[in-house]
Amino acid sequence: MEEILRLLPEGVKRIIQEFSRTDKESMEEIRMRINRPLEIMIAGKPVFPLLNGSEYYVSKNDATQMINKLSQYSLYALEEELKKGFVTIQGGHRVGLAGKVITTNGHVKAIRDIASFNVRIARQKLGIATPLISYLYAGGWMNTIILGPPQSGKTTMLRDLTRIMGEGDEMRRIQSSKIGVVDERSEIAGCVQGIPQHRLGHRVDVLDSCPKAEGMMMMIRSMSPDIIIVDEIGRREDSEAIIEAINAGIQLVVTIHGHTLEDLYRRPSIQELIRSGVFERIVELSRSDGPGTIKAIKDKTGKEVRSKKVM
């Protein structure tokens, strides 16, 4: 949280500091929109904090302070980030940006007149993936897809699985594996200047801000990983790259948006991948008992191997 507080406008910073320790530990997002109330997401619920008895409206000066701190008073330093619409900061936290989009030949060149900021607070939950080990490992790691709606803990679960795979587990006699992480949105590793901000293990290599399909091929050619980790697949080229990786003898663990396995059968770019049975395990998540709730674990035929909810 200290990394975030250093970047916030003074008025917003004072408000955040007034929250209880429990609320701070449950904060997920800090949303600032010019001329609109400050919004804090706490345990999945929006909170509009008060200052002197009134909602705090974000000012243009707050936005200026925020962008100056993010860019260290040089917008040129954020040129590449402004094309992507977010900035990853120390600690692996991510600041999303919205405003006027400048395009060239149909491609985003930059975002100007930034009017909205979404600070997504990254927290590594060590051990959250431990209940999955006995279902995903049987002498080797199985090709796995983690499925869930937004904010159900998919990336958090994927990050901890990456750590377990990269470190190994002596108690369970699981050796560490060479892991290649293709981190298109800088959320799994949270790299800052190429250095992961989260604990992922000693045998993990990260391609940061790299398109997924291209990144998978780059990993295969250059880093010879045992396992490739990818967040939020969905395009046809992602599916094609996954097939190429599996044919090269590499295991994959990926995430995708959806509520149930049935949702994936209705997506043209994904349905053939699922029907082919390349994913030996499908983990369905929800946030019914908080992010990371394991709703079901299924095999490649859709049969549940464990359906009891566990945290």
Image (spheres, grey):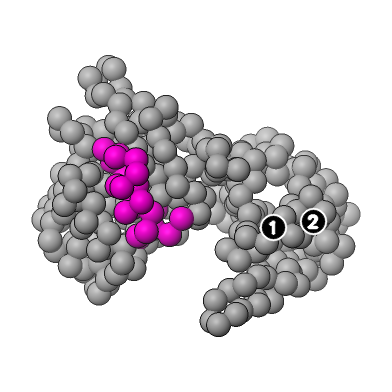
Q: Nearer the viewer, residue 296 or 52?
A: 296
Q: Nearer the viewer, residue 105 or 126?
A: 105
- Three-letter amino acid code at disc 1? Leu
Pointer 1 and pointer 2: residues touching (CB < 8 Å)?
yes
Can you say which quadrant of the picture contains the C terminus?
A: top left
Numbered badge on residue 299: none
Distance of mark 1 from mark 2, alpha carbons? 7 Å
The residue shown at (34%, 44%) is 222
- Three-letter amino acid code at disc 2? Ser
Identify residue for label 2.
74
Q: Residue furthest top?
A: 171
* Residues drawn in magenta: 210-233
The residue shown at (45%, 47%) is 207
The residue shown at (54%, 81%) is 106
Q: Nearer the viewer, residue 59 or 217?
A: 217
Q: Is residue 242 left or right of residue 31?
A: left
Identify residue for label 1.
78
Task: Identify whether 169 is placed above or below 237.
Answer: above
Residue 196 is situated, as x and y percent measured from the top left of the image, at: 52, 38
Task: Identify whether 303 is placed above or below 234.
Answer: above
Residue 134 is situated, as x and y percent measured from the top left of the image, at: 21, 32
In this orientation, does residue 289 appear?
no
